[in-house]
Amino acid sequence: MASSPRPLCPRPRPPVVCPLPLAVSVRVRRSCVPSRSPSPSAFAGRVSPPARRLLPPAVCPLAAPAAVMVFQCQRDSWARQFTTRVASCSPAELPAEGGAKEPLRGFHVVLEDTILFPEGGGQPDDRGLIEDIPVLRVTRQGPAAVHFVQTPLEPGREVLLTVDWDRRFDHMQQHSGQHLITALADLMFGFKTTSWELGHQRTVIELDTPSVTAEQVVALEENVNEKIRAHIPVVVREHSEDDPEIETVRSRGLPDNHTGPVRIISIEGIDDNMCCGTHVSNLSDLQVIKLLGTEKGKKNKTNLVFLAGNRVLKSVERSHGTEKALTLLLKNGAEEHVEAVKRLQNSVKLLQKNNLNLLRDLAVLTAQNFKSNPVRGRVFVLHRKDGDSEFMNIIANEIGTEDTLLFLTVGDEKAAGLFLLAGPSEVVEKLGPRVAELLEGKGAGKRDRFQGKATRMSRRAEVQALLQDFIGHQTLEE
Ligand SMILES: [Zn+2]
């Protein structure tokens, strides 16, 4: 795995408590999910009513969002649109990411409340629009959610927020799926979850066990999907921090400085878990979960890889596309693909072996043909598109380099390739570097051989002229 899973969900950050009595009026509902499970399609086009403005900035001396520690996206995960007001807007930079070299300049916008989830607890942040302005990142800063945009917004202005629903619903399916798998892995096998990561393609749960058997994976997947079919409600409750009930739920304990309500996500009869994320309201919203298997994790841990909901459909779609393409290429049914590829690999290996043998025979014959020519010159030049270093060296070995200067090249005539200069040591040592220079390549040699890579094979004629010229002068001097 490229990156390690993130820590489990932290509790909501402690709020900044507004000293005015009005701040006390910021209350959260004890249960904020519909009692009946809505399917994703049932919410198509649903628009949330405009939000009650929690704290008018003019009244509370603290910024209004400071008191909002449970955001609208957490109270109603299904809200796709929401009307709120700009609390503040200040110049900001988004650090360079995804290959970009320069940070992005823009603005940090804080709203009175938001339906765009700021990243947290392993769940990535949402994308969306403030009016028609794209929100490129949402982060937590203290109790506030900060929206990065590239167009300034005037504080006090009423704005319509729209969440990128495909992205959000995907995150809801993966996150609630993680809660379900985590709970059942613990109930069935006592495997505790130590962290998880919601990736772009797949989600990973780190289990505190050195191994998980294939049978356990199958049994877990069966149980997970059985629970999905049983359409069990998922309920979000907010408890006061001194509620004894929160001591009984799955978590690593509240931080020492925690104040304010605690969110508990309950999968009825299966799991209670403190979490800040956005969740589905019924397991049936998960549609299906596919456990892709396990990978070795950190020391004594095992990573369990899974897909939930629409990701399963997309994965099947991709696999089916690949299967159709392979059926066309291999001209047989899907169940025979693996065998067909194995056969192809074997025949490629055999062909490569035959090709190598033929190339060696050709090298020997080429050398013998040259040596049997009574009127051969002192320079032997040969270029072959297909060939390798071995091919060139066999020719050099067969011809011998005491009397003959050889210039051999292989590769694309108009592009890059390999070259070998062989002959009397004093000539090769002198001309080798010049040949490499002419071919705009690099090479190295010892005594009677100088070989290397050329980037300009098209300049072979110039090398040949240089060699003929050199030998011509040498012959005259003799
Ligand atoms: Zn969670």
Image (cartoon, grey):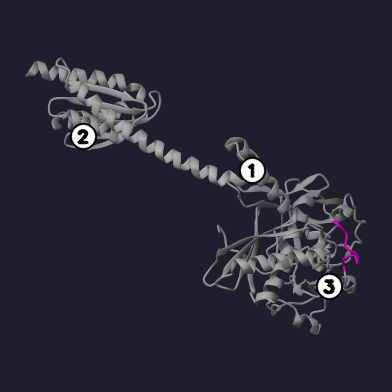
Instruction: Report helix, strand or loop for mark 2.
Output: strand
Is residue 221 magenta-colored? Answer: no
**Residues at marks 1 and 2, CA–CA distance in whole angstroms:** 51 Å
Is residue 36 magenta-colored? Answer: yes
Name above or below for residue 104 compared with residue 425.
Answer: below
Q: Residue at x 29, y 28 (%)?
A: 362
Label 2 crowd bin: few (<14), some (14–19), many (20+), radius 10 Å:
many
Question: In the rendered structure, which disc, 2 or 3, sits on the residue that comes first in sequence?
Answer: 3
Which label was assigned to residue 449?
A: 2
Which label was assigned to residue 237?
A: 3
Looking at the rendering, which quadrant does residue 465 occupy?
top left
Q: Which residue is most to the bottom?
A: 244
Where residue 8 appears, x then y in whole percent? Answer: 67, 69
Instruction: Report helix, strand or loop for mark 3.
Output: strand
Can residue 315 be seen in this snapshot?
A: yes
Instruction: Report helix, strand or loop for mark 1.
Output: helix
Q: In the picture provided, is 359 more to the left or to the right than 99? A: left
Question: In the rendered structure, which disc, 1 or 2, sits on the residue that comes first in sequence?
Answer: 1
Q: Which residue is most to the left?
A: 478
Where residue 111 appears, x then y in whole percent? Answer: 81, 57
- Kindly identify which residue carries mark 1: 323
Callout 3–callout 1 Cβ contact below 8 Å? no
Q: Which residues are magenta?
A: 32-39
Q: Nearer the viewer, residue 55 or 133?
A: 133
